[in-house]
Structure formats: structure tokens, C-alpha cells
Image (spheres, rainbow, N blue to C red):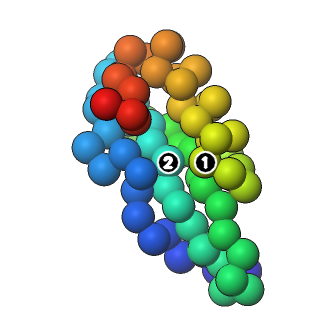
Amino acid sequence: MKAKRIYTENQKYKEFHENCVGIDYVQWDDDSDGYIYFEEHICGNRAEVFYKTMDEAMVEYDGADEFYQIGSLRE
């Protein structure tokens, strides 16, 4: 299945320690959807984890916020 990224939740995601993090809302070609939490290093390496709900993805994001001190999505 191919994913279509609709938008990035944190469009002005902040960088710290050469990493940026954010949450993408995605929709697959079978009309299912969800959220992908991502961490991307300045060199281009990217890690992604899929979550069905925004609340689940926010748990991951808030953990990164504590580690990277990037600021909350809710600001």
C-alpha cells in the first residue's frame, strides 16, 4: 500500500542536536489512515513509527521533547 502524506502536524518543527522530529498524518490507498512519528537526522537518516491515533503518537513526541528540548507541538 502506498502512503500519501497529507500534512506534517508540526510544520515548524525545531532542530536540536542536529535532529528534527514531527508527526505526519498519512492516508493509504485503501482509505485507512494514521500518524507517523518521525525523527530525522541532519545527514538524512530517518526513523518512523506508525500510530493509529494522534494521542499515541504524542506520547512518542513528548518523550522526544524531553530528550531534545524541542518544544511542544501544543505551543
At horizontal 54% and vertical 31% (from top left) the residue drawn is 61
In the rendering, at what x and y percent does residue 8 appear?
A: 40, 56
Q: Is the residue marked by circle 2 packed among few (<14), some (14-19), or many (20+) residues within 10 Å?
A: many
* Residue nearest the viewer, comparing 66 with 75: 75
- Is residue 2 or residue 13 the one in the foreground? 13
Question: Could you tell me if residue 21 is visible in this image?
Answer: yes
Mark 1 surroundings within 10 Å by alpha-carbon count, few (fewer than 14), some (14 through 19), many (20 or more): some
SS type, badge 1: helix
Query: Type of residue at label 2?
Result: Ile
Q: Which residue is mark 2?
A: 23
The answer, for residue 45, to whether it is visible in the render is no
> In which quadrant is the C terminus drawn?
top left
Quarter of the image with the N terminus is bottom right
Q: Which residue is mark 1?
A: 54
Q: Disc 1 to disc 2, how far (Cα)?
A: 8 Å
Asked whether, in this view, residue 34 is left or right of residue 67, the answer is right
- Sequence-wise, the earlier of marks 1 and 2 is 2
Residue 75 to residue 67: above or below: below
**Vertical relation: 39 (above or below) 33:** above
User: For residue 33, what is the image quadrant?
Assistant: bottom right
Mark 1 and mark 2 in contact? Answer it, CB < 8 Å: yes
Position above or below: 65 against 37: above
Q: Residue at x 64, y 41 (%)?
A: 55
Q: Secondary structure at mark 2?
A: strand
Is 18 displayed left or right of 67 in the figure? Answer: left
The residue shown at (49%, 69%) is 5
Tell me residue 36's x, y (percent): 60, 52
Task: State which mark lies toward you, 1 or 2.
Answer: 1
Rendered position, 8 above or below 21: below
Q: Look at label 1 and name its amino acid.
A: Met
Quarter of the view holding residue 12: top left
